[in-house]
Amino acid sequence: MKKINTFAISLIVGLFSTAVFANEVTTQPTTLSTQPPVVTAPATSTAPVNIQQVTADPNSVNINTASAAEIQDKLVGIGGKKAQAIVDYRTKNGAFLSIEQLKEVSGIGAATLEKNRSRIVL
């Protein structure tokens, strides 16, 4: 009889504690938000990326940002004077909008432009 009483008491205590726990879980305050959840993407890099400077050809040159020395070094048939003329034209008139616009620079003609077309980046 003592075993039955011990079992019954254990059963009652177990049921009571389960009921109390269930009541605590269901009566927890909930906050209803009308705002959608904020979803953030993981950061991959904090370094800024400048797409214009990324080129496939190591001999290419951005004529809107390169120095006269870089232009002279990378373009075929362009010496120091023509390279400086490109920089001066860019300074006076603003960035080149097309590769064809290079023909407006003194000393640069169609033949020079065609030799260098694949090397020029805007």
Image: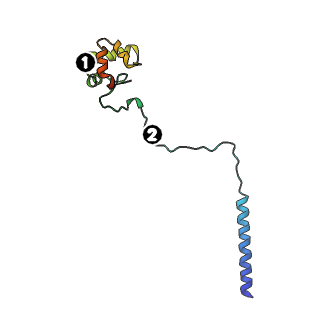
What amino acid is labelled 1 in the image?
Answer: Gly
Question: How busy is the neighbourhood of tag 1: few (under 14 within 10 Å), some, or many (20 plus)?
Answer: some
Please give left or right for residue 8 compared with residue 53 in the image: right
**Quarter holding the N terminus?**
bottom right
Q: Position of residue 54 (x, y in %)?
A: 37, 32
Q: Is residue 60 above or below residue 81?
A: below
**Which residue is at a point 70% across and 60% down the rendered structure image?**
25
Q: How many marks?
A: 2
> Are dots 2 and 1 in contact, CB under 8 Å?
no
Q: Is residue 60 above or below residue 15?
A: above
Colour pattern of the rendering: rainbow
Mark carried by residue 46: 2
Residue on which the image places disc 1: 80
**Which residue is at a point 31% across and 11% down the rendered structure image?**
106
**Which residue is at a point 32% across and 31% down the rendered structure image?**
57
Find the distance from the CA under tag 2 to the CA under tag 1: 38 Å
Of 59 and 29, the residue lying toward us: 59
Report helix, strand or loop for mark 1: helix
Report helix, strand or loop for mark 2: loop
Sequence-first disc among 2 and 1: 2
What amino acid is labelled 2 in the image?
Answer: Thr
Please give left or right for residue 83 compared with residue 32 in the image: left
Q: Quadrant of residue 4?
A: bottom right
**Quarter holding the C terminus?**
top left
**Which residue is at a point 71% across and 70% down the rendered structure image?**
17
Q: Position of residue 36 (x, y in %)?
A: 65, 43
Q: Position of residue 29 (x, y in %)?
A: 71, 54
Please give left or right for residue 22 compared with residue 99 in the image: right
Question: Which of labels 2 and 1 is toward the front?
Answer: 1
Q: Is residue 15 above or below residue 102?
A: below
Of 4 and 64, the residue lying toward us: 64
